[in-house]
Image: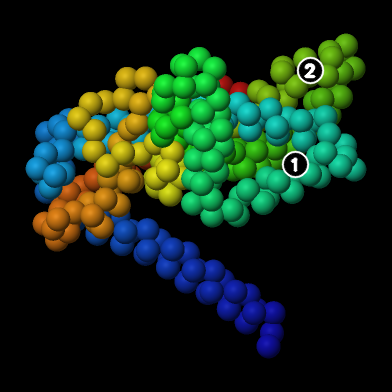
Amino acid sequence: MTRNTKDIIVKSLTGVSVLLILFVIVAVLAITFAGGWKTLSWEFITSFPTDGMTTGGIFPALVGTALMTLIMTVAAVPFGTITAIYLAEYASERSILARTIRFAVKTLAVVPSIIFGLFGLGFFIKFVGFHLDSLFNNGELVWGQPNILWASLTMALLTLPIVIVSVEESIRTVPKEMREASLALGATKWQTIRQVVLPGSITGILTGTILAISRGAGEVAPILFTGAAYYLADLPNKMSDQFMSLGYHIYIMSTQSTNVDDTLPIQFATTLVLLLLTFSLSLVAVILRYRIRKKAR
């Protein structure tokens, strides 16, 4: 077999793979849009569910998902960035601590999401929440129960490996010469990181944020035990409140509804809203990343 023949075979296989992936993506979006666009309306987005969630809208689930995603991002991105800075700038390649952290990050990345939910139940609710109630609430059940804060922190742990890996790789792309030039001009290590490394890797931080949002917004398993509710008549107004989630709402509608077939349009419309919400949050980060890149150039 000649080299040209091998090249043609490889190009054909890669081309077919790309087309297959594009077909699956387009098919999923098309089926979701076709099944939900008739139900999707402004009233559907801004109203509460009624009649056992077989009619009405998804407003509380939409607000709950947005709040959880924002809290998760605020919790995961700073800690992930700090960890990535330590691994890339301070830790030695032979450091046992750095190797342990990298091993932990790789392990967390492959742990099933349901395990994070069980961890959140045992650590945040049963341990942290129980002790907070014992210390500050005279044993009254406030933090020792599922709520939006514990669910968001559990999701932050789930997405933390994504942020760490993305930011560390971005930091390593900053040329070594820029660091050396900064140090040669008299800047300290931290000043070099703050003034040179972080601005040069800000796009990687935003990439990690985008990936974290995409992963966390639609997850259901971790929030089953830590904060998601079947139905709520009010929106969450404090961190110790439970919340409704779009992903959990879809799960309930497709498995626990009195008539699953009748709720199919609602399921498709809710899925379409979840995709639009995820795309919107990611689009904000993409636009911000583009403007930062353009300004840096």
Residue nearest the viewer, comparing 109 with 207: 109
> What residue sits 27% from the left and 42% below the top?
230
x and y percentages locating residue 190 in the rendered image? 78, 17
Label 1: which residue?
A: 101
Image spot of residue 146 (x, y percent):
41, 34
Quarter holding the C terminus is: top right
Task: Establish if 253 lies above or below 152.
Answer: below
Residue assigned mark 2: 190
Task: Give the residue type that dot 2 points to.
Answer: Trp
Q: Secondary structure at mark 1?
A: helix
Q: Amino acid at mark 1?
A: Ile
Asked which secondary structure carries label 2, the reply is helix
- The colour style of the image is rainbow
Q: Residues within 10 Å of mark 1 (few under 14, many from 20)?
A: some
User: In which quadrant will I find the N terminus?
Assistant: bottom right
Residue at point 49%, 51% (across, down): 114
- Tell us which disc is closer to us: 1 or 2: 1
- When the figure is inspected, residue 252 is found, relative to residue 232, above or below; the finding is below
Q: Give residue 46's quadrant in the image.
A: top left
**Could you say where residue 179 lies in the image, as x and y percent from the top left?**
82, 25
